């Protein structure tokens, strides 16, 4: 039966790895969000990922490997700054975009000369990639343009029996996707803020250039303006800006409950901690979406550390 949810224990991992080796598609947990994985060297298997997600073919996939040594084989050239980043942050929530090796199929890169690769830190993800014995191509396991999944239930709800299997490893620890870094003349360029704070990257690799929308710097093809969208309309406000209440609207607060009556309220982190807020972000939006609210007020969060990734996702969801 397709779409079956199984525990990410030893037996579950074995079954999922066998499915990947046979050309199947399996949803699995990583430390950032759940991914929809297939054999990254098998073009037909990768094609199924695009079909299940309803994702346009111009949007390339990330390849996941189990070690930096294996990941390096997917690139044809690795600048010194990239070497330093791999050493310090892999396994972890960092994706590197570099010139591709010849063995990487065109469908993975959407025909680009570069490939995106990461070594995830989630233990289930690592065990699965090791058991599959090949790079695993995986975008986030949501329908194209919808909220990213941080639990197996989110995946099941959006993708139904599309995947051959859904591995359940509990809630994704970080809760937002990886930070994506490309290189321009050996210097790092931020393509997507994510689970690894920019400040930590700059400590290791020096100043990071920003890919401005509409500018000459490349952006990730998948970083479309409207993305990560819940079914409701999102309105971004300053904390405390809306305190008269709106019984029809839902409210996503950063650290403090708003005054006034709302249909539903979620608080991302009572302690005002950005890591905790990132980990609860998509789950809170999924929950507010389920209340049927047509409008969700969302509070701005501080724009540093993981706050950058949170604001990026909120702005895209509100666009
Ligand atoms: O945390 C993550 O990165 C999760 C987990 C599953 O690993 N994956 C994920 O994949 O977020 P996805 O496909 O939802 O987002 C990957 C982004 C897309 O915006 C895509 O356009 C961009 O990476 N990308 C992939 N290859 C690229 C390339 N060669 N050049 C520029 N951008 C690329
Ligand atoms: Mg995605």
Image: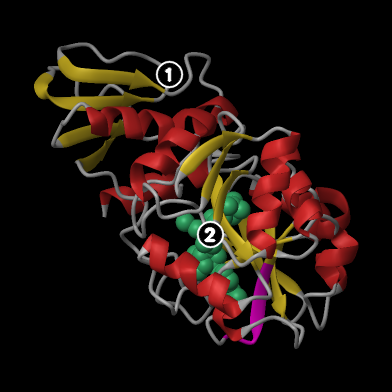
Q: Does residue 112 appear left or right of residue 252 in this picture?
A: right
Ligand 1 quadrant assignment: bottom right
Q: Residue furthest front?
A: 1
Look at mark 2 in the image and give the residue it sits on. Answer: 139
Is 44 a magenta residue? no
Rendering coords of residue 187 (x, y %): 74, 72
Q: Residue at x 41, y 55 (%)?
A: 162
Q: Which mark is residue 255?
A: 1
Q: Is residue 302 visible?
A: no
Which SS class for mark 2? loop
Picture disc at residue 199: none
Task: Give the residue displayed 28% in from the left and 21% down from the top.
Answer: 240
Residues shaded magenta: 112-116
Placement of 54 over or under 131, stated as above or below: below
Mark 2 closeness class: few <14, some 14–19, many ≥20 residues within 10 Å: many
Task: Decide whether the magenta segment is chiefly helix, strand or loop.
Answer: strand
- Quadrant location of the C terminus? bottom left
Judge from the rendering whether residue 138 lies leftward or rightward of residue 196; answer left or right: left
Residue 282 x, y percent position in the rendering: 42, 36
The answer to whether the residue bearing label 2 lies less than 8 angstroms from the nearest atom of ligand 1 is yes
Magenta-drawn stretch contains 113: yes
Q: Position of residue 224 (x, y in %)?
A: 37, 66
Colouring chosen for the image of the structure: secondary structure
Q: Earlier in the sequence, mark 2 or mark 1?
A: 2
- Which residue occupies the foreground of this view, 316 or 293? 293
Up-down: is 176 above or below 146?
Answer: above
- Residue 134: percent from left, percent from top: 77, 65
């Amino acid at each position: 039966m397709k779409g079956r949810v199984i525990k990410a224990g030893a037996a579950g991992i074995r079954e999922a790895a066998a499915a990947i080796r046979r050309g199947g598609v399996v949803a699995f947990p990583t430390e950032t969000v759940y991914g929809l994985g297939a054999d990254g060297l098998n073009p037909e298997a990768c094609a199924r990922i695009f079909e299940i997600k309803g994702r346009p073919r111009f949007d390339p996939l990330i390849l996941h490997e189990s070690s930096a040594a294996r990941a390096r084989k997917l690139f044809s050239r690795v600048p010194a700054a990239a070497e330093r980043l791999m050493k310090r942050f892999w396994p972890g929530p960092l994706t590197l975009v570099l010139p591709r090796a010849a063995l990487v199929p065109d469908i993975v890169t959407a025909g680009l000369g570069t490939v995106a690769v990461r070594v995830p830190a989630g233990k289930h993800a690592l065990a699965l990639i090791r058991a599959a014995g090949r790079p695993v191509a995986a975008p986030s396991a949501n329908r194209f343009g919808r909220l990213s999944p941080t639990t197996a239930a989110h995946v099941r709800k959006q993708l139904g029996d599309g995947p051959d299997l859904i591995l359940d490893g509990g809630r994704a620890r970080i809760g937002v996707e990886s930070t994506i870094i490309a290189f321009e003349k050996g210097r790092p360029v931020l393509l997507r803020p994510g689970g690894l704070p920019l400040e930590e990257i700059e400590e290791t690799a020096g100043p990071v250039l920003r890919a401005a929308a509409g500018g000459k710097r490349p952006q990730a093809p998948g970083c479309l303006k409207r993305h990560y969208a819940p079914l409701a309309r999102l309105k971004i406000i300053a904390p405390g800006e809306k305190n008269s209440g709106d019984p029809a609207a839902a409210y996503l607060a950063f650290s403090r409950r708003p005054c006034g009556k709302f249909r539903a309220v979620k608080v991302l982190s009572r302690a005002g901690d950005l890591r905790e807020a990132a980990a609860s972000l998509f789950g809170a939006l999924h929950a507010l979406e389920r209340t049927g609210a047509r409008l969700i007020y969302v509070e701005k969060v501080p724009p540093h550390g993981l706050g950058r990734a949170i604001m990026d996702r909120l702005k895209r969801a509100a666009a």
